[in-house]
Amino acid sequence: MKKILFITDFFGPDPGGMENFNTGLVHSQEDAVVLVTASPMLSDEGKRQSFDHALNMPIHRISVPIPNFLVPAPARNREYAARFQQLLEKERPDHILLGNLYGRTAGLVPQIYRSGIPYSVILQPLDLDQLSLLHLNLHRFLKKAQNIFVFSNYFHELAVMKGLRGDNIVSVPFGLHARWDRRLIKRAKSQIMDRLKDVESRFRILSMGPLTRDKNLDRIFRVIEHLDRMGIDRKSYAWIIGGSGPEYGYLKELIGLHGLENTVFLVGFLEDLEVGALYYFSDLYFHPGGQPRNQASGYSASLLEAGYTSLPTVSGMGAGVDEIIRHQITGILHRADDYESLARSIIDLSRDAELRKRMGRFAEDRVLTEYDIERTRHQIFVRI
């Protein structure tokens, strides 16, 4: 069996869709070694050590700076390169699998290329957005990859359109690594859940971050404008937005401008257990949808997490969303800018608990059968 070195910016114990996917991908995978390139400042060291120990596989963490291809890194800032070379010599992998390309992992591309070790790349939606802007060497690096894995047929076509050869591109499902137990989640104590006790009697809508511009969470306020016009009392529902990011201040300002302090709740950064608790606490998931020229904005692991927790979804359309949500079966889809129809579907589902339950059950079944991380793991590792 080949020894695989898996390199990624995104890994547990940090919460997030990509972190969850990457952790699940290598979980129980024999002869796999993990290198996490994220900055150690982004998470708690004690939690990292406990997490790494529990995973029971070699996990290395080397902080790699995000490369600036126009300005070479000074020699004193290249300690990571020496540590990476030592890792290659120690582990002697047969194949390298990159969990993403755009970001810190790109800083290791020259060494991977010079090592002569065969490599494959999981091309994330964000990578595809940046593909035309990537440094030419990264484009060449992709063309020489043994495999390029993408998460849907939509992204397969997009990669070919952006100049990658199609014979080494493989479409695989974005697998969900299920890690929440409904009974344990409900018993877990959380300050955030304590803060939301006052809205338990309302209809609860959930949207998840990260709070970045490309997630289009400001569209929520356009939908609320239509709920107002349709006579829906703001005190009858609570709209919860989970996650952190640079748009937090902007969204908070919008809440104040619209007088929604008692309707829309920003709960900030969440531990993984709290993420699960919010899904189980909610009645409906809302996804704003994507932008035509931003592929990362549409496809979201949160849609799978909502399905896994039996939540029906109302969503705007976007890149790859319609491959996850089955319209009128696991949720409702509309054009991302059709705020009136999105609002109407929220009202319809809020008034029909049986329909929500049925859609949620179908959504859970679909995630468990078609988006199981075991299926994704097999499709990737059997090829490398």
Image (cartoon, rainbow, N blue to C red):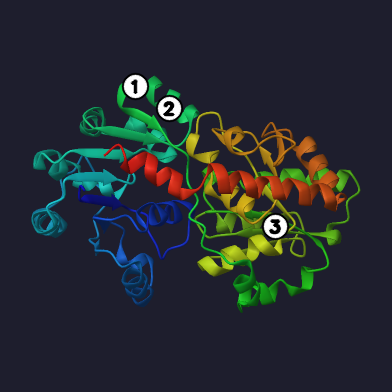
Q: Nearer the viewer, mark 2 or mark 3?
A: 2
Q: Disc 3 designates what residue?
A: 255
Distance from label 2 to label 3 (Cα)?
38 Å
Q: Earlier in the sequence, mark 1 or mark 2?
A: 2
Image height of 51 relative to 6, above or below: below
Question: 145 left or right of 329?
Answer: left
Q: Earlier in the sequence, mark 3 or mark 1?
A: 1
The disc, 2 or 3, on the residue closer to the chain's N-terminal end is: 2
Query: Which residue type does callout 3 highlight?
Result: Ile
Alpha carbon separation for disc pair 1 and 2: 8 Å
User: Dot 1 corresponds to which residue?
Assistant: 166
Do tag 1 and tag 2 residues touch (Cβ < 8 Å)? yes
Residue at 27%, 51% in the rendered image: 7
Q: Is residue 22 left or right of residue 134?
A: right
- What percent of the width, then of the height, locates residue 351? 88, 50
Horizontal side of 250 relative to 140 (left or right) equals right
- In the rendering, at what x and y percent does residue 179 appear? 51, 62
Q: Where does residue 159 sit, x and y in percent of width and height?
A: 39, 26
**Numbered disc 3: secondary structure:** helix
Amino acid type shown at disc 2: His
The kind of residue tagged 1 is Gly
> What label does residue 156 carry, if any?
2
The image quadrant of residue 120 is: top left
Residue appearing at x 33%, y 31% in the figure: 133
Q: Is residue 312 visible?
A: no
Closest to the camera, between mark 3 and mark 1, is: 1
User: Residue 369: horizontal and vertical position, in percent?
Assistant: 56, 44
Q: Quadrant of residue 333?
A: top right
Left or right for 54, reference 342: left
